[in-house]
Image (spheres, rainbow, N blue to C red):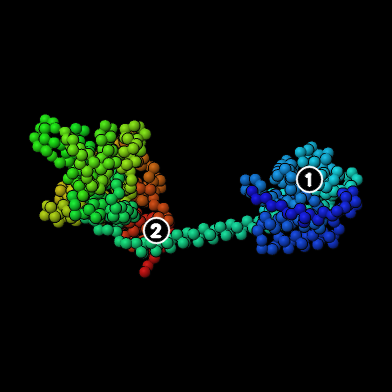
Amino acid sequence: MKEHSAPEGRTGASSSSPTQRATALRTPSPDVALFGIYEISKILTAPARLEYALTNVVSVLSSFMDMRLGMIVVLDQKGDPEIVATSGWADPGGRPAIDILPRKIIDRLVATAVPIVIQDVSSEPLFADSVDIVTQRLGDKVSFVGVAIKADGGVIGTLSINRLCERPPGHSFDGDLRFLTMIANLIGQTVKLHRMLSADRQRLLNEQASLEKALTSRSRKKSRAPSPEIAGIVGESPAIVDVLETIAVVAKSNTTVLLRGESGTGKELFARAVHDLSPRRTMAFVKLNCAALPESVLESELFGHERGAFTGAVAQRAGRFEMANGGTLLLDEIGEISTAFQAKLLRVLQEGEFERVGGTRTLKVDVRLIFATNKNLEEAVAKGEFRADLYYRINVVPVFLPPLRERPGDVALLAQKFLDRFNAENERSHVFSETAIETLQRCYFPGNVRELENCVRRTATLAHDESVIGEDFACASGKCLSALLWTGSGSGAYRGAQNPQGHHSTATPPAKAADREINIALPGGQTSMPKHDEFASASEKDEFNDGPGYPPVRRMIDRDKLIEGMEKAAWVQAKAARLLGLSLRQVNYALKKYNIEVKRF
């Protein structure tokens, strides 16, 4: 709330006593009232902050119109005081003016929009707490007049004044009410205009900020160095490009990196990328899966052992830390190690030194550490399954690897890469048809890139012709076993298998398979897959799907996202479909539904 008060010297108080002034205090004459309106209109139309303009208005009322203790209260949208402009209300005790004027007076004016006239405030219960200040300032006989400030049919504030008046009981205050009502109307329109200008200014500032952000983002993209070429990593989606850029920056230092992501997202491949882009690229890159070994063997694998340290230790053996000295060590599945071994590992991370199993000589190594996990470490720390001090030690630069479902535009690129690799290994010449790519883009791939590679290899192995079509995939015949994790049936990209007569198989009714949920642990903490009707409305199922038997596995794309994708693809529908992870038919249908005209260049 902004509170402004006019200086006491501007209230126009003379040195004469209140009794001597009483005879002169009457309803303002028409000329005086017209002069007051003129002066106030000049103030309200001058280019100044609203709170200062309103303070000058109450000063004019006090100086020229003998209306003392003026107060203008402007309310915000919640009904709380936003601006309080006063004249003569300064309290020696330091109380704000809004607390001296009875709040019930303001509330009544706002609620009823009816003027309030109190001929003698000393006899009014509402003024019981403030009558001493009023009479001390003006005299024993003080009247109060208050009107509502209106704009757009609603009350947005109040205007009130006090008068020293020795008038007989029943005297009319019509002149004061008419004058104050005109002033309140002028104030109401001024407040409305200021708010409109403020809203327009804020809108323009927001638009300017948005444009500046867009220009900055565009300039950064133009000046951005191309993503590093890393063998084995394929993708053009923004999610994977951001990860590659982060890795390119992180690789330049020796900082510990924690790769986090679902199983099959390529954590080992990205760890290798960190090493290949680092100054340690010429040294060893050593990796170890911590979940594949029991604790006793894991200790020996990491730290090495001396001859005779345990049964079978017939010779001294260097551990992975020694092997990676000067290079990089990847510890995969770090979230699976026991709490006892976590304490041993913590010392190595803190001191950079260790002893071989069965040995006493302390060894010191220089190793760049990369950790990887698909486990929720924060939840493990909360449950006491993972040491908090080890968590803080390894979680220096976390890099989150996106699952394949968050980079649908990369599915076709990855599938082609895997098919080319299969052809080279097996001297085949398989190619994907358009229906094959569309089938792959509709799949959920809970196993991410690893599952996609297995799917491509399996399909290419069993394909009858060189051209791989959509029907060649296991999901087309209801044989995709990984789909059981997500739908509870063998239907992968298809709603259900059909027999040669065109009827659905009776083993698993399509409707029931689509509607039931399987309570299993899913990525992101989910416990069940959404039902099919959560992905698309009934009106979209026939048009947005690619054919009979295909489920609505993706919701209808938003108009803004569709336009953004088309602009990125230079309005080439096939390229936009690949970027958006949709089929060409789906993009074409969405363009028609949203009535978007395709630009021609």
Can residue 39 be seen in the rendering of this structure?
yes
Count residues near mark 1 (Cα–Cα under 10 Å), then give few for <14, some for 14-19, many for 20+.
some
Disc 2 marks which amino acid? Answer: Glu
In this rendering, would 300 be left or right of 26? left
Judged from the image, the secondary structure of the residue bearing numbered disc 2 is helix
Q: Measured along the vertical axis of the image, is residue 301 above or below residue 400?
A: above
Say which quadrant the C terminus sits in.
bottom left
Taking depth in this image into account, of 524 and 345 the one nearest to the observer is: 345
**Residue 285, horizontal then vertical, whole percent:** 19, 49
Can residue 107 be seen in the rendering of this structure?
no
Q: Residue furthest top?
A: 311
Q: Residue furthest bottom?
A: 601
Judged from the image, the secondary structure of the residue bearing numbered disc 1 is strand
In this rendering, would 405 be left or right of 89? left
**Residue 82, horizontal then vertical, whole percent:** 65, 49
Query: Which mark, residue 116?
Result: 1
Distance Cα–Cα, label 1 vs label 2: 59 Å
Q: Residue at x 28, y 34 (%)?
A: 343
Query: Which mark, residue 564?
Result: 2
Q: Residue at x 20, y 39 (%)?
A: 362
Count residues near mark 2 (Cα–Cα under 10 Å), then give few for <14, some for 14-19, many for 20+.
some
Q: Residue at x 88, y 52 (%)?
A: 16
Disc 1 marks which amino acid? Answer: Ile
Q: Quadrant of residue 318?
A: top left
